[in-house]
Image (spheres, helix red, strand yellow):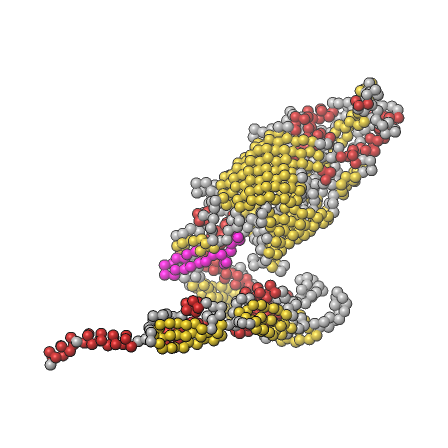
Amino acid sequence: MRRSLRRSLQFLPLFCCLLAFTAWGQQQIVSQIRVIGNREIPKETVLARMFSHVNDPYDPLTVERDFNSLWNTGYFDNVYIEKEDSPKGVILDVYVTEKPTIREINYKGLNSLTQSDVLDRFKKEKVGISVESKFDEARMAHAIAVLKELEAEHGHQFAEIKPDIKKIPPASVQINFVIKEGPKVKVGDIRFTGNEHVSSRDLRASMKNLRPVGIPHSIFLENLFARTYDASKLEEDSERVRQAYRDRGYLRASVGDAKTHLRNETGLSMITFRPKKGKRIDITLPIEEGGRYRLSKITFTGNKAVTNVKALRAQIPVKDGDYFNATVFYKGTENLRKAYGQLGYINYSGIPTPTFDEANHTVAFNIDIDEGKPFYVSRIEFQGNTTTRDFVIRRELMLEEGQVYNSRLWELSLQRLNQLDYFDPLKVDQDSETHQNTEAGTVELLLKVKEKGKNSIGLNGGVSGLGGSFLGLNYQTNNFLGLGETLSVQANVGEVQRNVRFGFNEPYVHNRPLNLGFQIFNTKQDYNSSKNYSLTGSANQQNATQSLLQKYNQSSTGFSVSGSYPLPHHSFKRVGFTYTLDRSSVSTFSAASSSFFQTLAFRSGIQGQNALEGIVSSMAAFSFMDNKLDATYQPHSGHELSALFQVAGLWGNVRYISPTVEYRSFHPVRGLKFDKEGHNVFGYRLQASYIHGISGDVAPPFNRFYSGGEQELRGFDIRSATPYGFVPTKVLFNLTNPDGSTVPRDPTNPSDGAIQIPLPVYGIASIGGDLNIVANQQYTIPIYARTVAFVIFNDFGMDMATSTTQLRQSPEGQAMLDSPLYGCPNYVNGACQGGVQIQFNKYIEPISGTNYAPRDSIGGELDVMMPIINAPFRIYYAYNPLTMHKDFAQTNLITRSMFPTGGAGDYTYALSQELYGSQLQLREPKKTFRLSVATTF
């Protein structure tokens, strides 16, 4: 028995193999797959979606999977698969009916919306209907629902939308959305019931979506314009009303379902005085206030890593004993989350549980903390930096791999990167990803950047108050070779300015944050004060007064080297040092400018024409900066404090000190309140500067402060907002006969010229200030990203000459004016004989009323960032409520005795009195319209 069983088992494997071969021989294979009915979708696309393939065994379950896969593509209205036997195997016939392709989409009756509004909403809601996409009934229903919702947001609650589908042979359709918007519905009266302790006015003010538009807290002007009714926003406003109660201590307050009443609008329009048309919806919100509670205490449980309860309690700024404020309390809990995040506990959660004491009307909170465990940074990676090297980004980060994760340091790291201006603005929640490994307690950080154009090469031109009309060629890269270096070459030739510069800056030296740079420059600046203000007197006075105004140009050539270092490392605070050496010369084109520059004691022992040549300034500047702005151009938030102290006199021939302090601050605004999520920005700048000569010299006149222009006071011309003074000047005046002809030196040789009488005259000069104060405020409304913005601004400034000793003439310069004889009581052979000496004041006195004069301008501007010149093109209009309108008379030193006797002497004296002794008027413009390429602050 055992032998026969053993033999049977020996033949069992052979028997199984025979069965397998038999089954294989009976199983059919797929010999061919045919796709039938497809028009636009290629056969290969259909086959790629199937699980069955030629020469595979035929399996009904696989065919069922094929059907589901093809149907789920959404390409077809109908799909079915037939099996056909053939000698070679199974043939699968796949019959498809393609969905029609959308060739055109029209919106008929769309009046309150634009087509771009609809397309943006379709994209946001992922409707999936577009030209050249496949028509789908479900998507059509979704599109109609989204359109109705969009119409309702714009006040058309009763809009009707019907689709009109027209077939376009052979397999396309045209979609027409036929829209009947109906009447526009606005919010009517908003009433509350049950509110005994909080006024309806305060509750209505909390409804940010539906409350009337007006001036807050003005009582009579709070309800100027009704808002468009949007039912979807009513629920949000109901929650805001409840929150308004909770912020006043009514923790158990509840707001019932809103009751609405549709009615026709009544009354007269405030603009047309005709009966109003349209619909209004009155809203009534029932309130149950409940009791009012004070906060008794806040306790914590589960806090193992942070055992300092006082430190935890300090994060919540609600004091014990005060009425409970829900907004402040939950901001405090958010502060707790951020504080734990700085310690690496990124999975922190805190659940507050209230305990009410009805007898004492108090509430106590216990916050149950689940700290989780601290996470360490395992890896930091970057995406999108095609040019910028990884190490350039990494060296700006305040968070390193292997370090405990700190959410605050990560935020500051992105802020530092934004200050580089290499990338589009980075935000933590949008541009960075955090991937946790819970088991290992590590986190990987991915930063996604989008690089800006680092190179700017082009021919540019424009208009600015400083440079006038200009044309220039420039090249600049702020990220040279992706290494973070800055290289710039600039050549601008303007109506009043020439500027040629070459510079290079290295932000890191030997992998240390030591910023080193240099610049070589050649500049020329023309200044003509007659363009900056209106100086009027008698009709014949204009040509003479032109010689008494400031007209000069200054040419400079030099170089500067600079360095700065953060304190401490990775800090936003930096100290810096800059050394500048330049050689300049001044060319004067009026008697007033010649006297002003040639006699002022800014170069000891040198006067006259020599004082205008070889002016060498050797200056050292020490700087401190604390920069926490979130962007270089159009900051959205943050502040910057900078201080600069300049000392000139090292090996040069001008000597002065000049400290400057500047503070800038920007705050996002939503509504009328500062809000971190706000879109608009309020910014202001405060700046104070001072200059004073040292070592017996006064400050050079061209280094004194002259305000005005688009960088300080937008409503005033460049360098025009300044004190004015009388500068002693020697004028040569032609001796003139009563008939207007001049008395010649030599009657036999008229070409030898006329007899000229030296006259002492005080010229009018913009003397500049030694103390300058500027305050700018502006409200920026971004229109398109940081490219286009509208700005409302107010600029205030004062330019003051506080120290008369800084307007002192040198002894040599004063002698040059005091020693000559003035007048020509007699002349022999065309040469003057006699005359008197004049003792001029050795100090240039400011004209009364022009010193300590405040200037102010208000207005609006449109800023557009130009991609080629990498600077904003600005169009602005400014009105100047504070300007200088001054009537004054020149100090008259001219007497009759300075002229010869006779008719020519009498006439010439009268003419000199008319030109140099009459009343003058100084007028600054009240309004300005200007095109400019520059920034203010």
Residues 479 and 262: in front is 479
> Does any portion of residue 449 appear in the rendered image?
yes
Q: Is residue 472 above or below residue 674?
A: above
Q: Is residue 94 magenta?
A: no
Stretch in magenta:
423-445
Q: Is residue 424 magenta?
A: yes
Q: Is residue 92 above or below residue 695?
A: below
* Residue at horizontal 37 percent and vertical 72 percent from the top: 32
Residue 579 in the image: x percent, y percent?
54, 35
Residues 117 and 433: in front is 117
Residues 126 and 713: in front is 126
Residue 519 in the image: x percent, y percent?
54, 37
Q: Is residue 699 above or below residue 444?
A: above
Q: Is residue 194 above or below residue 475?
A: below
User: Is the N terminus in the top left, top right, bottom left or bottom right quadrant?
Assistant: bottom left
Residue 455 in the image: x percent, y percent?
53, 46
Name the outermost residue toward the bottom: 1
Residue 198 in the image: x percent, y percent?
63, 69
